[in-house]
Image (cartoon, rainbow, N blue to C red):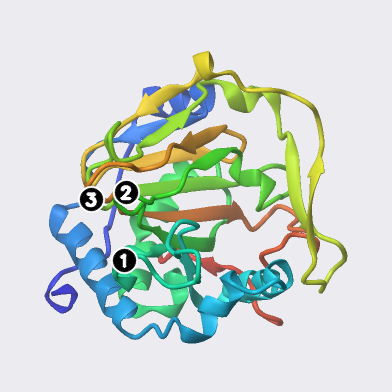
Amino acid sequence: MSENIELSLGSIKITQSQIDQYHNDGYLVLESIVPEAICDALKSRMTELMATFDPASVRSIFTTNEQSRHTDSYFIESANKVSFFFEEEAFNEVGDLKQPLELSINKVGHSLHFQDAVFEAFSLSPAWGELLQQLGMVEPRAAQSMYIFKQPGIGGEVNCHQDSTFLYTTPMSVIGLWFAIEDATLENGCLWGVPEGHRHGLLKRFERHAPGSIETRMVTLKEHAWHQSELVAMPVPKGSLVILNGEFPHLSYANRSARSRHAYAIHAVDNTCDYPELNWLQAAKGQSFVPFRAK
C-alpha cells in the first residue's frame, strides 16, 4: 500500500498566532493535517515489520530475574535500531503472551526515521523541518522516533513527564511531533497535558552513569508536583499533529477500551545546541542526528 502513496509532505505554514500559542501554552494541535492514506500506509508498514519480529530472544528480557540489566542493554541499543517493546500486561504469570503478538507490543523504536524506508520518507519530510524552524529551531535534526500502539485493554499508562528529561540539550531545544495514526479519544488513551507547565522548567533528567555506560539513572533537578486539576485532555482525530515543547508536562492514561490508539512520534533537537554524552540516546559512533530533507 505504501508503495503507491507519496509519504513526504512538502510544506506546512502556521500563523504567528499559532506560533505564539505554542510558546505560551507549551503545545499546539494541528488537526487532520496528515492525509488518512498516509496514516494507513504507516500502519500497514508497521504490520509488515511486526511480521518479521521474532519475540523469542526478547521475551526473556522481560521474564528473567536480571530484567533491569538486560532491559537496559536492549533499550540503549535501540537508539540506532528498530526494536520492539512489550506491554507490561502482555504476559501471564508463567511468561506466556496472553493475546496475539500484534496486540502485545507497547512500542517500536527508536530509529524508524532512518532505519526503515517507509517511515524515513514520512519522518524526514521537508514539512517537519520547516515547521520546526517556524517554531524557533535553527538546525532541526530528528533524534528519535517511536511507533506507539496503546493496545486495547492492556495499553499501559504513561506517567506525567517532559520529553527533555530524556533528550537533554543546552540550551533546551527538544520539540516532539506526535502524530495520531488513529483517532485518539478519552476512551482509548489520548494525551493529557498541563498548559503553560513548561514554564516551571525541567524537573528531571534521565542520563547514563557515565559516557558509554549502559547503566542509567533519573536525576531530580527541582521538586514540583503536577496536580490532576491542571491537566487538560487533548483528544484528536486521525491524521492530527500535536506539537510538544520539550518541557511541556504530558501523560496518557491506560487504555481499557476495545480500540487501539496508534500514534507515531518524532523527537527533534537543534543541532546548534550542546547534546551531552550522558544522554541515553546517542547517534552511532562517527555520525550525527539526521536532518530533515530540504524542499
Cα distance between the residues tagged 1 and 2: 11 Å
Query: Which image quarter is the C terminus in?
Result: bottom left
| Image x and y of residue 182, in percent | 23, 49
SS for callout 2: loop
The percent position of residue 166, horizontal first and vertical second, equals: 66, 52
Say whether marks 3 and 1 touch (CB < 8 Å). Answer: no
Badge 2 amino acid: Gly
Which residue is nearer to you in this view: 107 or 32? 107
- Look at label 3 and name its amino acid: Val
Residue bearing mark 3: 34
Foreground: disc 2 or disc 3: 2
**Which residue in the structure is indicated by mark 1?**
99
Which image quarter: residue 253? top left
Q: Nearer the viewer, mark 3 or mark 1?
A: 1
Which label belongs to residue 276? none
Which of disc 1 and disc 3 is earlier in sequence?
3
Q: Measure the C-alpha gap from mark 2 to mark 3.
A: 27 Å
In the picture shown, does residue 137 fall above or below 76?
above
Instruction: Tell me the residue that label 2 is attached to.
Output: 153
The Cα–Cα distance between marks 3 and 1, rounded to whole angstroms, is 31 Å
* Marks 1 & 2, CB-CB < 8 Å contact: yes
Q: Can residue 170 be seen in this view?
A: no
Q: In which quarter of the image is the N terminus?
A: bottom left
Q: In this view, does 185 lie to the left or right of 116?
A: left
Q: Which residue is drawn at 28% across and 34% down?
A: 187
Residue at coordinates 59% horizontally, 23% vertically from top-left?
Answer: 197
Return the x and y of residue 75 as percentages of the image width and height. Answer: 62, 69
Q: In the picture, residue 68 is in which quadrant?
A: bottom right
Amino acid, disc 1: Gln
**What residue appears at the point 33 percent right and 72 percent down from the top-left corner?**
101
Earlier-in-chain disc, 1 versus 2: 1
Residue 94 point in image, percent of width and height: 50, 71
